Amino acid sequence: MATTTSSRALPVSLMPPPLPTWKRAARSLLKAKWPILALLILGIVVFMALFAQHITPADPNRQNLIERLKEPMTYNPDGTIKYFLGTDGLGRDLWSRIIYGAQVSLAVGVMAVMVGGLLGTSLGVVAGYRGGRVDDIIMRLADIQLAFPFILLAIMVLVVLGPGVWNLIPVLGIGQWVTYARIARGQTISQREKEYVEAARSMGARDRRIMWDSILPNVLAPLIVIASFNVASAILAEASLSFLGLGVPPTVPTWGGILNESRDQILAGKWWPAFFPGLAIMLTVLSLNILGDWLRDFLDPRLRGR
Amino acid sequence: MGPYIVQRLLQSVFVIIGVTLLSFLTIHLDGDPTYLYVSERASQEEIEATRAKLGFDKPLTEQYFSFISGLMRGDLGMSIRSRQPAVDLVMQRLPATLELTLFAMLISTLVAIPIGIISAVRRGTPTDGGIMLVAMFGQSIPGFWLGIMLILSVGLQLKWLPISGHVPVIDLMLQGDWGQALSNIPKAITFLIMPAITIGLFSLSRNARLVRSSMLEVLSQDYVVTARSKGLSERVVIIKHAFRNALIPVVTMLGLEFGFLLSGVVVTETVFSWPGVGRLVTNAITQRDIPVVQASVVVFAVLFIGLNLIVDIIYAQLDPRIRLR
């Protein structure tokens, strides 16, 4: 009786057990080369941010006008490196400032995405689940925001409130909510009529419980992909605003801020105070973008190679 | 077509009201906005006088209506520093900004399309890989840093292009001096190249990726397979059958693209000392000249919304499916 099983349909017990997600993720990461490199770079940046106090060779804010604009790889008389990346126009150690700069960039990037993601996802799920008037209002708000270059509004808010991390994070977060809301809404609409939602409802679950416990976990995948790209764009936006002097106060070293201070030295041909912070921004953003691409392929294999 | 235009127009009006409301409320975010309009050493009487003059002692709704009625008359207050109408300052600088934005848009579209097609046609080859890697870099470089690096390398080291300066074109056209405007174009382009690349590289990269994925989508469609099996040459298949349909998502992007480039203008103009609205905004930020910042935001928004409206209407004309949606 059992021997009549056709070759096409193996009994379930003979199929290899499905790998847990993280194992499949690790395998797919190892197969692709770039994401590994990206992960490595991000690891270094995170390490720099977390342990800045312990690994910086000098105080990032200590000025030393005699030692201003020293070139990269300046050595001590005893042959050890004194200034790895040189010094800026006020004689501050550039390498130390860039290490500290990682703190602000990462913190602002991640927290802005958390604010935007939380806000956008909640509104999107509610809009998709409730439909009707609520949906209309939320989506019209989204249209208004999309019809407008957001950075301009961010500039205005920061001019009024003054620069600072705690003003910057909500501003950048609010700038991003629409993307999450639109995707969460679309996904929710497609999930709303599925059987598992029906099942939860017939067991007497309230709407709030259905939205957060049943639907949310099933709409999360594309949102995670968007989040990884948005950390990158939040870091870029923070750098632009710091470059305009609207990011954080000048005493806090940030990549955009260091770049801004370096502008006076460019015409004198001193390239390093501008080159290295920009390189740091680019490598971080590039890594996040590459990882985002990989994550999208991994979570939605239909898009692979597109 | 008629009902569609009316609907889109209403939508735009709605959005403009939303934007003005936002830019109005922003000023009030930090409580009494009077302090934004006076110097730090202002006396109590000066503060009172300014508050009364600008109407900040009136109820918020009344202030909003006078803001709107001012807006209708093209009046967004006086610049604090130069004592000129803020809108006039913005309008004077607008032609230079438009030149930069349009040129950046031209570069980012014209270069992206062939690159994206080549990449899609040679999918999986080193050419494709190389192009996509460069595009990935292009989307990750902060614009202002690219600008500074261009100034350092192309401008100061190689001395190929001027690092700052501007030759007017659109401004002359508006004054009716077309002959001078046209003869200025070659010179103007030498000044435009570096800032335009700075603003446009991100869009260029994104467009190249968009063209590629849209081409790949189209190339797997039945009508392309049919065209190939009819024995048409590959060139005809790609240009006549695939490309035209692959262009649809790219055209959709163009309207939004303009707004995106406009927001890149602020930092880029600062880097290249370009005499446009972006630099006006940066200077207004450092001088805390709120009316000028506000006027720039509103002018940019109206421009952006108007442009999107036009793009959408043209688009609906071209593709009837949009109207029926």
Image (spheres, coloured by chain):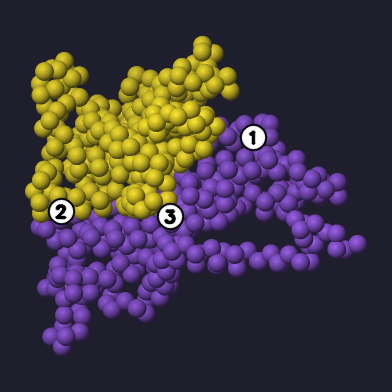
Chain colours: A purple, B yellow
Q: Chain of mark 1?
A: A
The verdict on a common chain for dots 1 and 2 is: no
Q: Which residue is mark 1?
A: A135
Q: Chain of mark 2?
A: B
Q: Earlier in the sequence, mark 3 or mark 1?
A: 1
| B288 lies left or right of B273 | right
| Residue A276 placement (x, y as % from top left) | 26, 63
| Residue B293 placement (x, y as % from top left) | 31, 37
Identity of the residue drawn at 41% across and 38% down: B211
Q: Nearer the viewer, residue B50 or B222?
A: B222
Q: Quarter holding the C terminus of chain B? A: top right
Q: Residues within 10 Å of mark 1 (few under 14, many from 20)?
A: some
Q: Chain of mark 3?
A: A
Identity of the residue drawn at 33% across and 22% down: B74
Q: Residues within 10 Å of mark 2 (few under 14, many from 20)?
A: some
User: From mark 2 to mark 3, how far is it between C-alphas?
Assistant: 27 Å
SS for callout 3: helix
Residue A289, which numbered label? Answer: 3
| B217 lies left or right of B275 | right
Cβ atoms at labels 3 and 1 below 8 Å apart: no
Identity of the residue drawn at 65% across and 35% down: A134
User: From mark 1 to mark 2, how far is it between C-alphas?
Assistant: 52 Å
Residue at the limit of the structure toward the right, as seen here? A1
| Residue B52 placement (x, y as % from top left) | 36, 32
Q: Which residue is mark 2?
A: B153
Residue type, mark 3 in image: Asn
The verdict on a common chain for dots 2 and 3 is: no
SS for callout 1: helix
Judge whether residue A205 can be spotted in this image: yes
